[in-house]
Structures are given as C-alpha cells and as structure tokens.
C-alpha cells in the first residue's frame, strides 16, 4: 500500500522500457525489465496487488504477481464475447472497478481506424465492447455503447464508480457514469496553451 508504479522508457519508445516502483519510503526500484521488447503501456493494479500492463509489440496484456511472476493475461485475437486469452489487445489505459472487472482502452492504430472501450469480466473472463468500434469523437450525452473514441490513453474510477477516460486524439477527458451515460468532463477538443 502506498506504492507508486510507472513505466520508464529511456531509449526510443518500446526499447529498454522498465516498470518501476516507488515505495512509501521513497525508494525507487525496477520491478520489470523489458528484455523481450514488449513495450509496456498502461498499468493497472488489482485488489491482490497484481500488476497488469499492455504489451504494445505483442498485442496482449501481461499480469505480474507480487512475487514478480509474469504471465500473459489476455491476447492473441480479437472478438467481442470471446475469452480474454483469445483476443488481440493493444491496451494503452487500464483500470479495475470495485467488482474486479478490468476496463481497457483498445486501439488498433490509425491505419485500421478501430478504437474501443472494453471490459474483461472478473468472473467469466469474457470480453465485452462497452463502447466505440470505429475511431471518432461522438456520443456525449448518450449511452457509452453508441460513443466513438479517438485513442483512450488512461482510465480511472472514482469512489462512486464513475469511469473517467483520457481520449487523447479528441483532446478531452470523458466520464461514463454508473448508468452508462458518457459526457465530456474536461477539455474542449482543442490544444491548450
């Protein structure tokens, strides 16, 4: 408890990346050295202190236990309604809700024009597309299922269960309330000064 985790890349993006930890006493240590050129992206911690992170070059999500055992949690294909280990993932933002479900921003790149908010159910490991599909910037004021996204880079939940996501290409923070309605929370779509 009280630890901070972050990704540190010190040479051109995915090469030589590390996951680092700052403990409550301020000591910094490397807990994952990316010798496999995974290109870690997006971090989430579950209630058991397992760390989940996207692997950009491998299109999957890895799980690292508190004893530093790393396995593939999800990845290898793509499909709404599939098991998590049968889908292809390029997850840049991740967060757990209080039920232990993992929410991720999926981005297939501008050449494919596919971006979505997805959920991996804690009980069944079934993946559901919560919103998005095609790249865009629409749907505020309506159901998240009908929304489009630019590139979801970060996710977090508040204590009331509302989800906040950084929609990088749209240059906004968007909020999905517990009823599933999405709204603009911060930003107007323009670059700041």
Image (cartoon, rainbow, N blue to C red):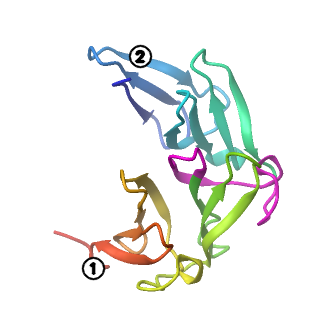
Magenta span of residues: 77-102
Q: Relative to residue 155, is residue 53 drawn left or right?
A: right
Reply above or below: 47 against 107: above
Q: State the residue position of label 2.
A: 29
Magenta includes 82? yes
- Along the line of sight, which residue is nearer the eye, 178 or 103? 178
Q: State the residue position of label 1.
A: 188
Reply above or below: 52 against 120: above
Q: Quadrant of residue 145?
A: bottom right
Q: Distance between the residues labelled 1 and 2?
A: 38 Å
Residue 14 visible, this orientation: yes
Q: Quadrant of residue 70?
A: top right
- Quarter in which the C terminus is drawn: bottom left
The spot of residue 174 in percent (x, y) is 38, 70
The spot of residue 79 in percent (x, y) is 80, 64
The spot of residue 1 in percent (x, y) is 38, 23
**Numbered disc 1: secondary structure:** loop
- Report the predominant secondary structure element of the magenta stretch: loop
- Along the line of sight, which residue is nearer the eye, 106 or 9? 106
- Please state the total of marks drawn on the protein image: 2
The spot of residue 36 in percent (x, y) is 68, 30
Q: Residue at x 41, y 23 (%)?
A: 21
**Numbered disc 2: secondary structure:** strand
Residue 10 visible, this orientation: no
Reply above or below: 87 against 128: above
């Amino acid at each position: 408890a009280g630890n901070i985790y972050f990704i540190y890349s010190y040479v051109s993006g995915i090469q030589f990346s590390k996951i680092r930890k700052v403990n409550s006493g301020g000591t910094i240590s490397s807990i994952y050295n990316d010798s496999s050129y995974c290109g870690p992206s997006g971090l989430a911690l579950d209630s058991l202190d397992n760390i989940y992170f996207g692997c950009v070059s491998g299109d999957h999500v890895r799980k690292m236990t508190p004893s530093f055992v790393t396995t593939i949690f999800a990845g290898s294909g793509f499909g709404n309604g599939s098991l998590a280990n049968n889908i292809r993932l390029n997850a840049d933002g991740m967060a757990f809700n209080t039920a232990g479900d993992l929410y991720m921003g999926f981005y297939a790149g501008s050449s494919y024009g596919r971006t979505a908010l997805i959920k991996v159910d804690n009980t069944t490991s079934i993946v559901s597309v919560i919103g998005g599909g095609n790249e865009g910037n629409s749907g505020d004021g309506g159901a998240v299922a009908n929304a489009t996204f630019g590139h979801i880079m970060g996710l977090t939940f508040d204590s009331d269960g509302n989800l906040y996501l950084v929609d990088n290409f749209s240059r906004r923070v968007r909020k999905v309330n517990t009823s599933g309605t999405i709204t603009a929370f911060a930003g107007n779509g323009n670059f700041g000064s």
